[in-house]
Image (tube, rainbow, N blue to C red):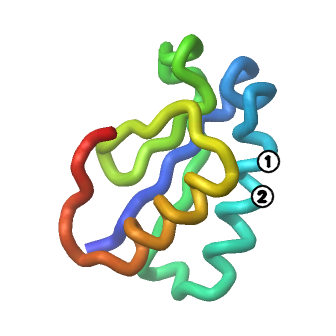
Amino acid sequence: MKKKITICMGSSCFTRGNKDNLKIIQDYLKDYDSAEIVLTGSLCKEQCSNGPVIYLDDTMYSCLDTAQLTDLLDSFVKEPSTMESK
């Protein structure tokens, strides 16, 4: 089953850090088979006050800085189990 990363590209999330987070995710995923992980962008998810917002499968993560994002990607990509909400 493919894993899905969805990054909110609404203006609030984009300016709060998802512009940089997108680049980090794209660079991170270069080492993985695109058949295993799907990266998509989305319009506003109505979570502006929590931005920047990223979804790993159906779990929302908010207010991520770059160090947290890398650790989260490591856990998500390398672990077969479903992650819990944070």
Please name the amino acid that badge 2 sits on: Lys
Q: Residue furthest front?
A: 67
Vertical position of residue 17 compared to residue 80: above or below: above
Residue drawn at 67 percent across, 27 percent down: 13
Q: Secondary structure at mark 2?
A: helix
Instruction: Determine which quarter of the picture holds residue 27.
Output: bottom right
Q: Is residue 84 above or below residue 3?
A: above
Q: Which residue is mark 1?
A: 20
Q: Amino acid at mark 1?
A: Asp
Q: Categorize mark 2 by other alpha carbons within 10 Å: few (<14), some (14-19), many (20+).
A: few
* Residue under the image location 23 percent in, 49 percent down: 84
- Spatial CA distance of label 1 from label 2 is 5 Å
Looking at the image, residue 48 lies above or below residue 20: above
Residue assigned mark 2:
23
Check contact, mark 1 vs mark 2: CB within 8 A.
yes
State the residue at coordinates (73%, 61%). 24
Residue 30: percent from the left, percent from the top? 68, 81
Instruction: Answer with left or right where residue 57 lies relative to residue 21.
Output: left
41 vs 76, left or right, is right
